[in-house]
Amino acid sequence: MTYELDPVPDGTPVVTCVYCGIQYTGGTPVHGAQVLKDHIMQCDKHPMFSIQQDRLQLRAALANLVGASTLPELYALKLTLLYAPGLKESPDGAAMIGGIDALIISIESELEAEGV
Ligand SMILES: [Zn+2]
């Protein structure tokens, strides 16, 4: 369990991160969980923090390799590569397209998780 919801004497719920002990009180919007998602990105004791940091590092490295990092850039680059004669059949072209696809999936899944 990542968080504990603790009742306090005045009835105001307190959400406590079980990894670092930080508490969110007094009107914190517990439902919707945005505050919890934001906390995970900042809590270096939370296991998801290092996973997220690793994912961002891998994404940045892959973006540097393919030379594009935004969805419009990635889609444009993929189209260019798909229509370049013989490129998608070559090992380098296939690897490049695979890297682009991985970046697109990573960015789109993050946007979907954020509800964008
Ligand atoms: Zn924490």
Image (cartoon, helix red, strand yellow):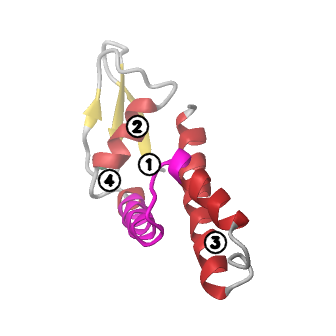
Element type at mark 2: helix
Q: Earlier in the sequence, mark 1 or mark 4?
A: 1
Inspect the image, locate mark 4, and give the three-letter code of the amino acid beneath it.
Tyr
Which mark is on residue 2?
Answer: 1
In the image, what residue type sits under mark 3?
Answer: Gly
Q: Would residue 91 be found to the left or right of residue 35 on screen?
A: right
Q: Is mark 4 within 8 Å of ligand 1?
A: yes
Depth check: give the residue in front, 47 or 56. Answer: 56
| Badge 4 or badge 3: first in the primary sequence | 4
Q: For residue 13: magenta?
A: no
Q: CA distance from mark 1 to mark 4?
A: 7 Å
Q: CA distance from mark 4 to mark 2?
A: 12 Å
Choose the circle earlier in sequence order: 3 or 2: 2
Residue shown at 52%/36% (left/top)?
114
Circles 2 and 1: CB atoms closer than 8 Å: yes
Amino acid under disc 1: Thr
Q: Which residues are magenta?
A: 51-73
Q: Is residue 66 magenta?
A: yes
Q: Residue at x 73, y 79 (%)?
A: 86
Disc 3 vs disc 1: Cβ atoms closer than 8 Å?
no
Instruction: Tell me which numbered mark, 4 or 2, is placed earlier along the sequence.
Output: 4
Question: Which SS class for mark 4?
Answer: loop
According to the picture, the residue beneath numbered tag 4 turns out to be 19
Report the residue at 27% width, 57% height from top.
44
Magenta segment main secondary structure: helix
**Does residue 70 sit above or below 83 in this rendering?**
above
Give residue 102's position: percent from left, percent from top.
Answer: 59, 64
- Quadrant of the image occupied by residue 64: bottom left
Location of mark 3 (residue): 98
Secondary element at image label 3: helix
Gap in Å between the C-alphas at discs 3 and 2?
33 Å
Q: CA distance from mark 4 to mark 3?
A: 37 Å
